[in-house]
Every structure is written in C-alpha cells, then in structure tokens.
Image: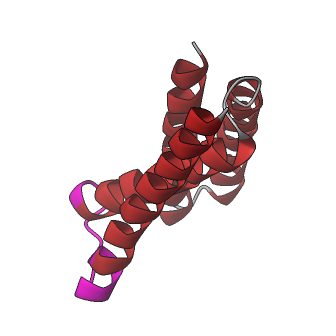
Amino acid sequence: MHWLYLSLAVIGEVIGTSLMKLLVSGGFLLSGILVAVSMIGISYVLLSQATRTIPVALANAFWEGFGMILIGMVSFMILGEKISAIQTAALLMAVFGIIVINYGHYLQEQKS
C-alpha cells in the first residue's frame, strides 16, 4: 500500500504542476496557484503516508525523480515545450540516481 501512496503522490505533483502551467498560461493566475498548492498539498499527505514504511531518502528520491521525469514528458508531449539534449541527459541521470538510491536501500536491508 505504501508504494501506491508514493505513486499517487508523484501523480498528484505532476497534475498540480501541469495544470498550474496551463491555467497560468491561459491567464488564470490565481486558479493556477490554487490548483498547484492543493495538488502539492495532497501529494505531501500521500508522501507522508508512504514514508511510514519507505525510508525518507528512498521515497523522496522516487517522488522528486519520477515527478521530474513525468513533468518533463508532459511538458514535451502535452504542453509543446522543447527539451534539449542536456535536459534529456539530466532526466536520465535522475533515473540513474533513483536506481542507485534504491540499490543502496536494498543492500542496507540485506545487512539487517
């Protein structure tokens, strides 16, 4: 269940950030801010539930990393924004970082 909370936290962050961009770009500044704050707040509540069983470092790496990757994909595919080769490389490094943190957690669990 904790991974479901964490996945929903990521999705909430992505929805909030993406809708904020759409609303603010459409001239709805206050609505964009309210949607973003609400969705990020919900995302933090879900993240807090996930950290009951997932270590904070692992949960935060997953939340931030996959959130960044999904927001990058939404930016490119839905919002029509450009992503440079350097930005693509940075997103791939984020994936690598998540894998390394997860592997470090796995090794720590094996020692216990």
The residue that appears at 69% across and 33% down in the rendered structure is: 47
Write the start and end of the magenta stretch as one range. Answer: 77-88
- Residue 44 against residue 67 in the figure, above or below: above
Horizontal arrangement in the rendering, residue 101 relative to residue 50 (left or right): left
Q: Nearer the viewer, residue 63 or 112?
A: 112
Q: Quadrant of residue 105?
A: top right
| Colour logic | secondary structure
Towards the viewer: 80 or 5: 5
In percent of width and height, residue 102 lies at 50, 47
Q: Is residue 17 magenta?
A: no
Horizontally, residue 90 falls left or right of residue 38, namely: left
87 drawn magenta: yes
Residue under the point 54% across and 51% down:
104
Quadrant placement of the N terminus? top right
Q: Quadrant of the C terminus?
A: top right
| Percent coordinates x, y for residue 25 in the rendering | 49, 64
Residue 93: x and y in percent read 38, 71
